[in-house]
Image (cartoon, helix red, strand yellow):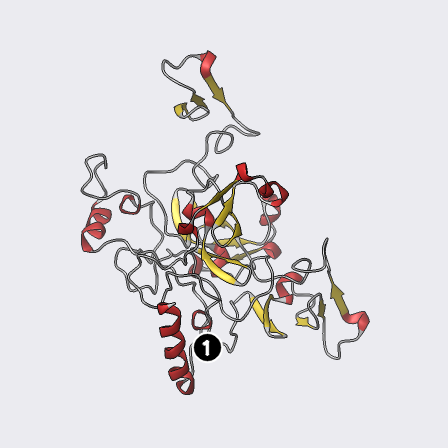
């Protein structure tokens, strides 16, 4: 309706821009709210972008706290501090964790010199080709990285690969499926899963030692959830740019539609609203190009470009006896 920005807080419908054809929103505070926000809802920032496994804090890109703490402390409140809640409660030490290993970029371990392993400013090389005439003068290190190689996003999640857990690090294996860890669901009070909906404080697990939550509906709610709050799933995990829908990993609708239709409702359909309003065709977009995996274009044969079940090789390293089986699975997944 008003595509022309005229200030941090106002947008204009058309030229010439006058008070009669402008819209504005300041929000509940002056800075970093209303129309004065970046694309992710945070503060406006320098030109460029962060990697897909990073978050912007204080104008600097850091690896996401949710990935570094396996979902236990997902909210960044400092360069080396992550919190398990929002707001003033993060001043309480019991809600926050500080560790120098949190003060890192998202590119560590991907063997790609163009994806920084240290915290960094947003990179212009991730948003515009260095040869384009419209790109402003780049920082020296950004320009050098752009000349080394095409940008390859780190798509594989950072997981502990030798802990015996075939689920994601914030999940546990129970009854053939991956559930969010009871320790995370109960704040460490009841860490032993005893059913899809119950967690136990200690052995022996008697009824009075258990906590339970069914939620507002019986399935995929309460304690019956995966690490990302969706339905429990088969062992393994998806790539960082993928989402799990009906047990299959697809490239995120938010990326495929530039955020316009962020909710997946079918293999090839994305919705702008979520819920029952997605039954209205006006809120949906269907395209065969949405029925894809997240690995397309990253030049890595181990990251599938087609939809696929969660991948165990992303959560646990294969034992020597399992290598032949793993190779057959890899060939099948990449050729599917």
Q: Quadrant of the C terminus?
A: bottom left
State the count of labels: 1
Image quadrant assignment for residue 259:
top left
Residue 55 visible in the displayed image: no
Q: Which residue is mark 1?
A: 162
Single out the residue that lies furthest toward the bottom. Answer: 321
On the picture, is 98 further left or further right than 92? left
User: Residue drawn 57% across and 29% down?
Assistant: 28
Closer to the camera in the image, 255 or 17: 255
Image quadrant assignment for residue 64:
bottom left
Q: Secondary structure at mark 1?
A: loop
User: Residue drawn 35% across and 45% down?
Assistant: 49
On the picture, is 176 further left or further right than 155? right
User: Residue drawn 62% across and 57% down?
Assistant: 94
Crowding around mark 1 (Cα neighbors within 10 Å: few <14, some 14 to 19, many 20+) is: few
User: Residue drawn 38% across and 38% down?
Assistant: 45
Q: Is residue 159 above or below residue 16?
A: below
């Amino acid at each position: 309706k008003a595509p022309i920005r005229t200030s941090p807080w106002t947008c204009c419908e058309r030229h010439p821009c006058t008070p009669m054809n402008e819209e504005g929103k300041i929000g509940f505070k002056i800075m970093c709210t209303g129309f004065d926000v970046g694309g992710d809802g945070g503060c406006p920032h320098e030109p460029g972008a962060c990697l897909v496994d990073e978050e912007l804090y204080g104008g600097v890109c850091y690896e996401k706290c949710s990935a570094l703490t396996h979902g236990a402390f997902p909210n960044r409140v400092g360069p080396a501090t992550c919190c398990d809640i929002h707001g003033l409660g993060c001043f309480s030490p019991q809600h926050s964790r500080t560790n120098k290993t949190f003060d890192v970029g998202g590119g560590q371990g991907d063997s790609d010199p163009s994806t920084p392993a240290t915290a960094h400013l947003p990179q212009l090389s991730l948003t515009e080709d260095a040869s384009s005439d419209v790109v402003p003068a780049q920082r020296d290190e950004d320009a050098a990285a752009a000349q080394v190689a095409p940008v390859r996003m780190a798509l594989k999640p950072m997981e502990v690969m030798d802990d015996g857990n075939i689920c994601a690090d914030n999940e546990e294996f129970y009854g053939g499926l991956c559930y969010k860890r009871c320790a995370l669901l109960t704040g460490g009070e009841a860490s032993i899963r005893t059913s899809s909906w119950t967690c136990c404080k200690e052995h022996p697990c008697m009824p009075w030692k258990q906590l339970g939550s069914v939620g507002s509906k019986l399935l995929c709610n309460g304690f019956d959830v995966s690490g990302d709050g969706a339905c429990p799933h088969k062992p393994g995990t998806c790539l960082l740019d993928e989402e799990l829908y009906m047990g299959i990993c697809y490239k995120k609708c938010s990326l495929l539609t530039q955020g316009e239709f962020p909710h997946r409702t079918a293999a090839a359909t994305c919705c702008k609203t979520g819920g029952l309003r997605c039954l209205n065709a006006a809120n949906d977009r269907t395209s065969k190009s949405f029925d894809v995996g997240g690995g397309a274009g990253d030049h890595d044969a181990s990251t599938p470009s087609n939809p696929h079940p969660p991948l165990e090789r992303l959560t646990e390293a294969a034992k020597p006896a399992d290598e032949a089986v793993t190779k057959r699975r890899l060939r099948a997944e990449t050729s599917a």
